[in-house]
Image (cartoon, coloured by chain):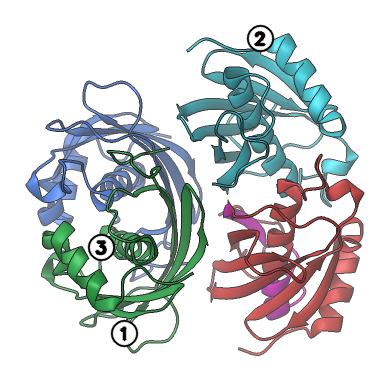
Chain colours: A blue, B green, C cyan, D red
């Protein structure tokens, strides 16, 4: 149940494999089965009216569970999302970052499942809820698997 | 059951309300309860390896159902996504656009539901499946509602 | 944010409106935004091999969120489920009840959302995760609304 | 892409492995990637007001995708549901059966995904929509896998 990478190792690895994405995200906290991830909200994440866009919230949830799985499994960037569900609950507050609180529910042989609550920083009540399932390729597999 | 906007009116309206998004999407076809939408895949939609990113596929599904609801309801950009589910089925082909085939399943007083199959252009077998629920604010309401 | 019914009032009301269902379920605990519900597992909930069936777990999650909404909204049995997502994570243990731990994420004007973790009693690690959305009819409405 | 069992073989097999469930369901039609399944609605499927219960609709969707996977994979009852999403769209009509129209979207090495529209027999407009993911254990595996 131990972590394969600590917070610094995980941040560095995300930066290697997703340099263009990693500038948006910061790993705030990491334990054996939880991760807290920040989306540094910028102009390109917004929709008219200052709301953070749905795809940006999807991306935050997806990266959170992905990073959690990597932190446990180690440098193995081939895992792929196979399923997701999201509920949009409240309008995000303007001008603040989003904070995702992710919990690993299952880390099986071939599937990992994590759920996520997303908050506007400093505001009570989640703006969104998400669950993501990742498919884990067999050891030695040369490519990402969609199951 | 008639359309409130035809394809050209819908395209123009999307361009007005989401100019930064609209350059990515083209309304290919529109009927009373279906819409076909193209994602013009560009560098910013890709992940390492040339795969279209999850957030880009989420965005395509979301815009497709949004456009379908607007085509029926008319110029009323306040509808908001309240729920989504997505299944990622196959790796998108490299170098081709994505085509979303959307069907409106319900257009109620306060909720609309559409489902979507996403294909790599010219390739059999969907790369993703999605369902989106939109909340429709009461007539005269001044702001988007999350229900 | 106060409860409209306490645990005893809620149990009695569930028994009135769903007598055939209520014998399966026990409200174990109730706070302003959480509820714990027990499924008293019986022969009819089982599949071959002694596993609790999927529909039984769906029913437990659905009743948990329903009861949570009623506890806050009061005697208003007309709310209807509009959306659900479930992830089945582990095989339930044989011969023990299921315990659902439900949290109310949103109680809006027209929509309520709750999520649920289901455990085999006395066993670590959830057997399932669920999110349920309920549509709340306008006050004075004569019938359940699907939105 | 051929079927491993035809409609009669599939019906007989479902009856062997789920005798208590099979009396509720009838395989109406079967092709290489679609199945039509009837829920013979009875008293125990109903909620007050004559509506078919959510768990009964969940069960119909689940059995439909399960039967479709078996029809392709052959006698291999170990596949297990890992994920489901359902949208409840309209109130089912009273006194008529439910008909599920299921389409197999993916049949991979370890995961199968099918989606389902459920109708009240003889009534336009689906009452529910569902997607189910099944995990397929490796050949020779002795037990169902949750991945």
Task: Tell me the quarter of the image containing the N terminus of chain D.
Answer: bottom right
The span from disc 2 to disc 3 (Cα, nearest Å) is 46 Å
Is disc 2 in the same subunit as disc 1? no
Q: For residue B118, what is the image quadrant? A: bottom left
* Horizontal side of residue B58 vs D96, given as left or right: left
What residue is pinned by disc 3? B56
Pointer 2 and pointer 1: residues touching (CB < 8 Å)?
no
Residue D94 seen anywhere in this rendered image of the structure:
yes
Residue A106 position within the rendered picture, expressed as x and y whole percent measured from the top left: 50, 42
Work out whether residue B2 or residue C129 is closer to the camera in this orientation and state it: B2
> Local crowd at mark 2 within 10 Å, few (<14), some, or many (≥20)?
some
Residue at image point 42% right, 86% down: B124
Q: Is residue C56 above or below residue D57?
A: above
Tell if the residue under mark 2 belongs to the same chain as the one under mark 3.
Answer: no
Residue lying at the far front in this picture: please name it. Answer: B140
Q: Is residue B48 visible?
A: no
> Magenta segment: does it hold D77?
yes
Q: Measure the C-alpha gap from mark 2 to mark 1.
A: 56 Å
Which of the 4 image quarters holds residue C80? Answer: top right
Residue at the (34%, 67%) spot, across then down = B71
User: Circle 2 is placed at which residue position?
Assistant: C6
Magenta-colored span: D66-87
Q: Which residue is mark 1?
A: B121
Binning the other alpha carbons within 10 Å of mark 1 as few (below 14), some (14 to 19) or many (20 upward) gives some
**Picture coordinates of residue C60, whole percent (x, y):** 70, 35
């Amino acid at each position: 149940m131990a972590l394969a990478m600590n917070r610094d190792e995980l941040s560095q690895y995300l930066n290697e494999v997703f340099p263009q994405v990693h500038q948006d995200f910061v790993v705030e906290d990491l334990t054996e089965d939880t991760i807290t991830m920040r989306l540094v909200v910028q102009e390109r994440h917004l929709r008219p009216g200052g709301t953070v866009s749905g795809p940006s919230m999807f991306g935050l949830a997806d990266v959170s569970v992905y990073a959690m799985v990597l932190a446990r499994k180690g440098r193995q960037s081939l895992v792929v999302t196979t399923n997701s569900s999201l509920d949009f609950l409240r309008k995000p507050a303007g001008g603040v970052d989003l904070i995702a609180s992710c919990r690993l529910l299952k880390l099986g042989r071939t599937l990992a499942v994590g759920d996520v609550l997303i908050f506007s920083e400093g505001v009570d009540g989640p703006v969104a809820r998400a669950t993501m399932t990742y498919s884990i390729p067999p050891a030695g597999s040369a490519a990402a698997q969609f199951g």
